[in-house]
Amino acid sequence: MVLRHIRKVKNSFSSLVMSIFRKRKNLKIGLYGPVNSGKTTLANKICMDWLGEELGVASVVPHETREIQIKEKVTMKLDGKSLAFNLVDTPGIATRIDFEDFIKHGISEEDAKQRAKEATRGVIESIKWLNDMDMVLVVMDSTRNPMSQVNITILGNLDARKIPFIIVSNKIDLKKSDTTKIRNSFPGYDVIGVSARNGDMMKELYRMMLNGL
């Protein structure tokens, strides 16, 4: 079973985060996940809650985010705890990028091909940045099948690098949302369902992020 290759001891999450946070400054928390899972929407919500300004532009067009975006000096304060970090929003990870997907959204063929090239570079850059992350929020669309090659690859890479992470089951405000399916697909991992768009369960996510301190 492929899940045997992406194991994580749940009790180690807090200790890993604690040891890293004690040793390092300028912490980086990265948002990773497949295309259109809501990474930028989540990044914007986090930045609005703690800085009062957004990070980037969210869109239904695939690969709208094609470059690494960073919001520095985000300070989260909740329940008497505080966490300062740089938030890194990454382009959506994909195993295949087809320029025709952009054309379906009314983009010209020339621009679509250019976007596809930029999106491909963005995916490569995202993977390179993974080693710099102190924590990762793996954003999944809870209305889709979680057992995708992209999700499995991301989790496998995080496990191999021993990077603490939380699976964020996004879009729980939608009728087809199924966070239980994500939990059952990846047992032993930290999973929380949120609606980045509506702000549902965001405090609970923040508590999970702060829990390592």
Image (cartoon, helix red, strand yellow):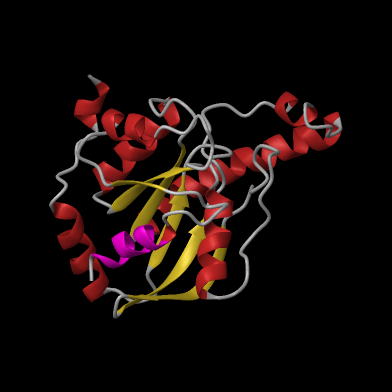
Name the residue rendered at 45%, 35% in the picture.
142
For this rendering, which residue is in front, 4 or 54?
Answer: 54
Q: Quarter of the image for the N terminus: give it.
A: top left
Q: In which quarter of the image is residue 210?
A: bottom left
Left or right of residue 47: residue 130: left
Vertical side of 209 occupied by 92: above or below: above
Left or right of residue 167: residue 211: left
- Residue 82 x %, y %: 33, 78
For this rendering, which residue is in front, 17 or 207?
Answer: 207
Name the residue rendered at 22%, 75% in the picture.
22
Q: Quarter of the image for the C terminus: give it.
A: bottom left
- Residue 107 x %, y %: 83, 34
- Give the total number of marks visible in the rendering: 0
Queried whether the magenta region covers residue 73, the answer comes back as no
- Residue 199 x %, y %: 51, 57
- Residue 57 x %, y %: 68, 55
Name the residue rendered at 19%, 42% in the picture.
8
Queried whether the magenta region covers residue 209, the answer comes back as yes
Left or right of residue 24: residue 120: right
Q: Magenta stretch mostly in which secondary structure?
A: helix
* Span of residues in magenta: 203-211
Furthest residue toward top: 1
Vertical side of 57 occupied by 145: above or below: above
Name the residue rendered at 38%, 36% in the picture.
179
Q: Quadrant of residue 121?
A: top right
For this rendering, which residue is in front, 196 or 70?
Answer: 196
For this rendering, which residue is in front, 78 or 27?
Answer: 78
